[in-house]
Image: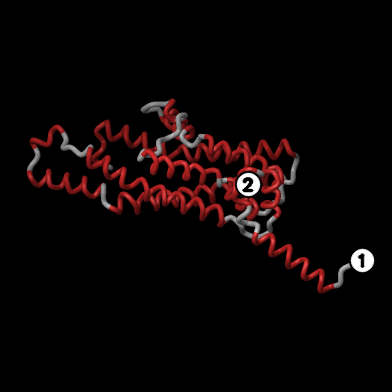
Amino acid sequence: MPMNKSETVMTNETIKQDDTNNHWAWVPGVLFKPRSTTQKIVRQEKAVWHIPLIILSILSILVIIAAAPIKRENAQMGASMPEDSQWWSEEQIAKYQEAQQNMTSGTFMYLFPAISKLIGIWFNWLVFSSVLYLALTLAGSRAPRLKSSNLVAWAMLPLALRHIVELILIFSRRQLPSGTALASLIGETKSMGLSLVKGMLGQIDAYWLWFVIILFIGGVYLAGIKRSKALWVVALVILIMLVIQGVPTMISQYLNSLSGSGFNMYF
């Protein structure tokens, strides 16, 4: 028996309301049921990227707040005067001690790290989704940019689990999170190429691989092109983003090498 007009309107409103309420249900869904959940995400015609990004932002700030007292304690315990400080004037010593105190102030312990972390999260999402959209468009996909933004944001949710593990580590062991094991494969180097590779390896851990898997799964549904072609496009985008994320490490290593070569007067 066909539904009348009022019943159809009520049904459509119910479906729409269910979709809205189910957005938060995508949080566990995208982690443990990525195939079905990413299909729902890429079908969305409106922006739903704010939920995972807000979760990531809040958790990253909580990690900074939890880690700050340990960092301050470590800095104070390890604070010592340089070897040549015996030749310094009282004014120089006072300035050095003041600088050390400033490094443990709330600005350096909370504000600057929080700003840096938030910029990193939102910048990476913005660039990643833009590069993904451009690459898919060049490959023949007609998916709008909004859907690329939604997919990348939700695929980043495994990184929130990383922050949860870091919080557990801080509160249970009073231990600061360390870098990935892969980054430690390359020690201090003056080679620009190796510095770039080190920065790229520093991004890779189990949570990053989880992110990549979700992105591959969702990218196939998003692209609407041949499966093998979509996988190659997503793989290329991931490689491009790894290079972009490795650039800061390369620049840092380069500046450190200049500083060690006697050019620190300019920095």
208 vs 100, left or right, is: right
Disc ID at residue 39: none
Tell how many labels: 2
Q: Residue at x 42, y 49 (%)?
A: 117
Q: SS at mark 2?
A: helix
The quarter holding residue 264 reads: top left
Question: In the visual, does 265 lie left or right of 92?
Answer: right
What colour scheme has been applied to the protein in the rendered image? secondary structure
| Residue beneath the point at 40% across and 36% down | 178
> Neighbour class for label 2 at 10 Å: few (<14), some, many (≥20)?
many
- CB-based contact (under 8 Å), mark 1 and mark 2: no
Q: Quadrant of the C terminus?
A: top left
Q: Residue furthest right?
A: 1
Q: In the image, is 34 to the left or to the right of 240?
A: right
Task: Provide residue 169's location: percent of width, then percent of height.
Answer: 41, 40
Using the rendered image of the protein, determine whether residue 130 is visible from the camera's viewpoint.
no
The part of the image, by quadrant, that contains residue 180 is: top left
Mark 1 — residue?
1
Within 10 Å of disc 1 (Cα), the crowding (few <14, some 14-19, many 20+) is few
Task: Give the number of the disc on residue 30.
Answer: 2
Residue 199's spot in the image, x, y percent?
45, 35
Q: Secondary structure at mark 1?
A: loop
- Mark 1 or 2, closer to the camera: 1
Q: Callout 1, which amino acid?
A: Met
Q: Residue 134, image x and y in percent?
A: 63, 47
Q: Amino acid at mark 2?
A: Val
Q: Position of residue 2 (x, y in %)?
A: 90, 67
What distance separates the C-alpha of mark 1 from that of mark 2? 37 Å
